[in-house]
Amino acid sequence: MTDPDKEEALSLRLDRANESVAEAELLIAHGHWNAAVSRLYYAVFFAANAYLIAHDRANKTHKGTRMAFGALINENQEIPRDVAKVYHDLFEERHHADYGFFSDLDGELVLPMLDPVRTFIHAVANAIAPKRS
């Protein structure tokens, strides 16, 4: 990936991460908790993708992205584990929300995830800043 292409890919992923948070906030305002969790998951997924692209380790699948992201942050320790934990948590909650027919999330579970998601995106943006053009 050339530097301009890489920069565009990073910008697009981070923009989508922030846009997904804004979408989740709208869903939360209307009590659509399951859909909000899905958008919050995608926010961290897009940010994790940006992180991997910045390190030339892009991945195309959800599972592959989670595995590569986890391995990379263990290797370089740029993203604290407590910040990265929201990725794992949201993966699990999104799975229950999207595929668990008897799963019905509520504000008590979803609202506390907003700040950790924002922190995750901010941590990724700060970590990749030196790698950007």
Image (cartoon, rainbow, N blue to C red):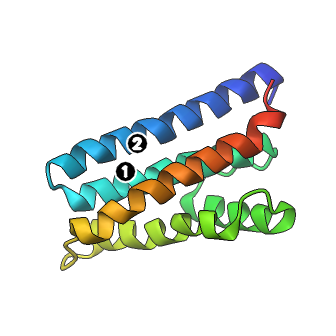
**Rendered location of residue 6, percent (x, y):** 74, 29
Amino acid type of disc 2? Ser
Residue shown at 54% from the left, 64% from the top? 87
| Element on which disc 2 rests | helix
Q: Is residue 37 visible?
A: yes
Note whether 122 is above or below 72 in the view shown. above
Amino acid type of disc 1? Arg
| Element on which disc 1 rests | helix
Q: Are marks 2 and 1 in contact (CB under 8 Å)?
A: yes
In the picture of the structure, the residue carrying the numbered disc 2 is 20
Q: Is residue 49 visible?
A: no
> Considering only order in the chain, which callout, 1 or 2, is on the residue closer to the N terminus?
2
Residue shown at 66% from the left, 33% from the top? 10
**Rendered location of residue 85, percent (x, y):** 58, 69
In the picture of the structure, the residue carrying the numbered disc 1 is 39
Note whether 19 is above or below 122 in the view shown. above
Residue shown at 62% from the left, 51% from the top? 48
* Left or right, 45 with reference to 98: right
- Nearest to the observer: residue 84 or residue 10: 84
Q: Quadrant of the N terminus?
A: top right
* Left or right, 20 with reference to 70: left
Q: Residues within 10 Å of mark 1 (few under 14, many from 20)?
A: many
Q: Quadrant of residue 125?
A: top right
**Rendered location of residue 37, percent (x, y):** 34, 59
